[in-house]
Amino acid sequence: METFTVRDLRERTGDLIRGAEEGKLSVITKHGAPVFVAVPFDDILVREGVTVALAVHLFDEEQISLGKAAQLAGMSRVEFTRHLSQLNIPVIRTDAGELERDLAAFNP
């Protein structure tokens, strides 16, 4: 998620639009305080509405937990997990280092 100031909007509008086209959320601030969130206009937003789209994007960008995202979307964790699965968004994410540590733990 990228942060823009109100002043940035004049000079970096293209960056904000490109980010939205790439599916990224942006927060716009004024004097350091959040004023609004720019949510990409995509299929999720059209089908599910703003709150579900916001929850999906925030979770996918690892800004909020699964539980918080489910709560924001007005779903149970199980429902939200199923919803993410339908969107091909992984719920569990591990990097190569984590995977190597886990495998090493199984092979003493």
Image (cartoon, helix red, strand yellow):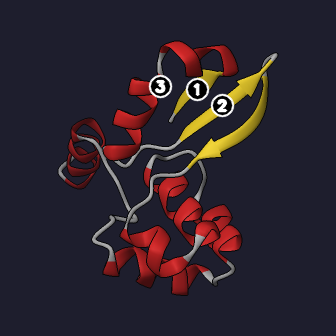
Q: Residue at x 46, y 74 (%)?
A: 46
Q: Amino acid at mark 2?
A: Ile
Residue 24: give x, y in percent of width and height: 42, 43
Label 2 packing within 10 angstroms: few (<14), some (14-19), many (20+): many
Q: Residue at x 40, y 74 (%)?
A: 84
Q: CA distance from mark 1 to mark 3?
A: 12 Å
**Going from the N terminus, do you reach mark 1 or mark 3 first?**
1
Label 3 packing within 10 angstroms: few (<14), some (14-19), many (20+): few
Q: Residue at x 67, y 62 (%)?
A: 68
Q: Which residue is mark 3?
A: 13
**Going from the N terminus, do you reach mark 2 or mark 3 first?**
3
Is label 1 in contact with label 2 (beta carbons under 8 Å)? yes
**Going from the N terminus, do you reach mark 1 or mark 2 first?**
1
Residue 41: give x, y in percent of width and height: 44, 58
Secondary structure of the residue carrying tag 1 is strand
Residue 94: give x, y in percent of width and height: 31, 49
Q: Which residue is mark 1?
A: 3
Secondary structure of the residue carrying tag 2 is strand
Q: Where, by quadrant of the figure, is residue 70 drawn?
A: bottom right
Closer-to-camera residue (41/33)? 41
Q: Amino acid at mark 1?
A: Thr
Q: Residue at x 24, y 47 (%)?
A: 99
Q: CA distance from mark 1 to mark 2?
A: 6 Å
Q: Amino acid at mark 3?
A: Thr
